[in-house]
Each structure stands twice: as C-alpha cells, then as structure tokens.
Amino acid sequence: MNMGSFTQQFLQQIINGLSLGSIYSLIALGYTMIYGIIKLINFAHGDIYMLGAFIGFVATTKFQMSFLPALILAMVGAGLAGIIIERIAYRPMRNAPRIAVLITAIGVSFFLEYTMILIATPQPRTFPAVFSPTVYHFAGLVVNNQQILILVSALLLMAGLTYIVNHTKAGQAMRAVSFDPDAARLMGINIDRIISMTFALGSALAAAAGVLVGIYYNSIDPLMGTMPGLKAFIAAVVGGIGILPGAMMGGLIMGLVEAMVSGFFSSTFRDAAAFAILIIILLYKPSGLLGKNVKEKV
C-alpha cells in the first residue's frame, strides 16, 4: 500500500468511525446520566436502543411516517418506557445493595429482549429505506447521505442535551441531585421526578441511536442491543462515567478504533479492540479520560 492510498483509506475510516462513534455516544450518554444521578449501571439500556429501533420500524412501515416524525415517536415511546422501567424495577430497589440493583438491571434487559422476541419473532427485520441513498465522492473519499444524517442528528441531540443540563431549571436540579441527593431534597427538589426525567432523556437518546442504526444498516432484530449496549458502556467508562462530555468523547474514540481495526486488520477483531481499550483504561486511568480521581468516603 503506497502512502497516498494509505492516507486515503485512513481518512475514509475516520469518516466511517465518526458515524459509528456518534451512535455509541448517544447510547453512552444514557449510561452516564443515570450513573451520575443514582450510581446505577443500567444494563437494560442497550435494549431500550433496540426498542427505539422497533418503534421507528413500526412508525415507518405501518404508519408510513417520514424520518423526523418516526424519530420523535421512537424517542417519546422509549422515554416513556424508561420512566416505567425506573418506576417498577429500580425505584423499589433504591436502597438495596448495589449487586441486587445490578441483577435487576440484567433481569430487565432479558425481559425486554425476550418480550420483543415473543412479539416480533427473532427474525431480523429489514428497515425501510427512509431516504434514497446518495453517495458523494470527493478527493477519492466516499460519504453517503446516511452517514451525514447520523452525524448531524447525533450532534444536534448531544447539543440539545448539553443545553438542557447546563441552562435549564430541570438541568440544574439534575446536577444538584447528582452532586448531593440529600441536600437537593432539603432544597425542595423532587428527587423521584428528576430521576424519572433522567431515565426519559437517556432512553430517548438511545432510541434515536436505534432508529439511526436501522436506517444505516437496514436491519434490526430483538437482540441487536446487546453488543452496542456493552460498547456504549465501555465508551462511558473510557470517557469517565458520570461525565457527559466524557461519554461523547468515549463514543467517538470507540467508533474510530473499531473503524481502524476493521479497515486495516480484520473486522473479526473489532469487538476485541473495544474490550482491550476498556482493560487499558481500567489499568492506567480507572476514572476515565475526563474523570477525576475521587477518594471513596468510608
């Protein structure tokens, strides 16, 4: 491979990695928000992403919706599902030992996956072509309109979330609960409502990622959330779990590394690379790239 074609392939993989990474970022934001508020790793989050993809699929096939209404419906539907799951499964476990809550999250994950298999059968479904694919060539690089759509949608959603968290009353309350729940309660903040809102926001972002993946890969199935859910969790840990910019950065790093490994070595090692990153981060920077080392209070 000469230098010109290497550079070209390298740039091509960066384009591919950014669209994949922005999807991981959207899912990772949900993990990070929920962990930041109630210190829960919600392992059912990948299945909320799957649920969003199926709501988008039904909206576009049965109700003939175009992209934006289908995306909004999927986000609202998954947001409601997130609120219901928090209310039924997690709220009664709030003062339970961490391990019990973790097992509950895994149970919710299996419940969502196999309920969807019961409803929709395990067969992969072909997501309808919401857009006619258009391919753009410039300087030897190939970019399609779906990649542009994924990147733009993800950036807009991340910007919207950042605005909500940093510049609204509700965002201020979320940060207060994250910092000190007891003090927030004394200040008159309704903690249950804030936690429900956090689940709704995180679930809505995961659902948006599910619809975007359906459009990009044209295929969805009830177990599609398992591996992206794990990788988004790794992305959240890599960036620093509980830190919003960290989740965004971690997702993009994961997407770029996967694209590079697939492009220059073999796509077989793609998943192994994700877990190798997790091991390296846990060995050398356990709090994540943007995390601060905080001493555990005894």
Image: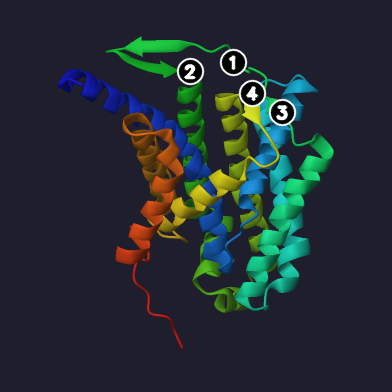
Q: Position of residue 260 (x, y in %)?
A: 34, 35
Do the CB atoms of the residues marked 4 and 1 lie less than 8 Å apart?
Answer: yes
- Residue 110: image quadrant is bottom right
Q: Earlier in the sequence, mark 2 or mark 4?
A: 4
Q: Would residue 169 be visible to someone looking at this image?
A: no
Tag in front: 4 or 3: 3
Q: Earlier in the sequence, mark 2 or mark 3?
A: 3
State the residue at coordinates (64%, 23%).
67
The Cα–Cα distance between marks 4 and 1, rounded to whole angstroms, is: 8 Å
User: Which residue lies under the disc numbered 4?
Assistant: 67
User: Which residue lies under the disc numbered 1?
Assistant: 131
User: Which residue lies under the disc numbered 2?
Assistant: 145
Q: Sort mark 2 into few (<14), some (14-19) or many (20+) by Cα contacts within 10 Å.
A: some
Do the CB atoms of the residues marked 2 and 3 lie less than 8 Å apart?
Answer: no
Q: Sort mark 4 into few (<14), some (14-19) or many (20+) by Cα contacts within 10 Å.
A: some
Q: Sort mark 3 into few (<14), some (14-19) or many (20+) by Cα contacts within 10 Å.
A: many
* 103 up-or-down from 280: above or below: below
Tag in front: 4 or 1: 1
* 255 up-or-down from 128: above or below: below
State the residue at coordinates (49%, 43%).
24
Residue type at mark 2: give it: Asn
Q: Position of residue 232 (x, y in %)?
A: 50, 49
User: Which residue lies under the disc numbered 3?
Assistant: 57
The Cα–Cα distance between marks 2 and 4, rounded to whole angstroms, is: 13 Å
Do the CB atoms of the residues marked 2 and 1 lie less than 8 Å apart?
Answer: yes
The Cα–Cα distance between marks 2 and 3, rounded to whole angstroms, is: 19 Å
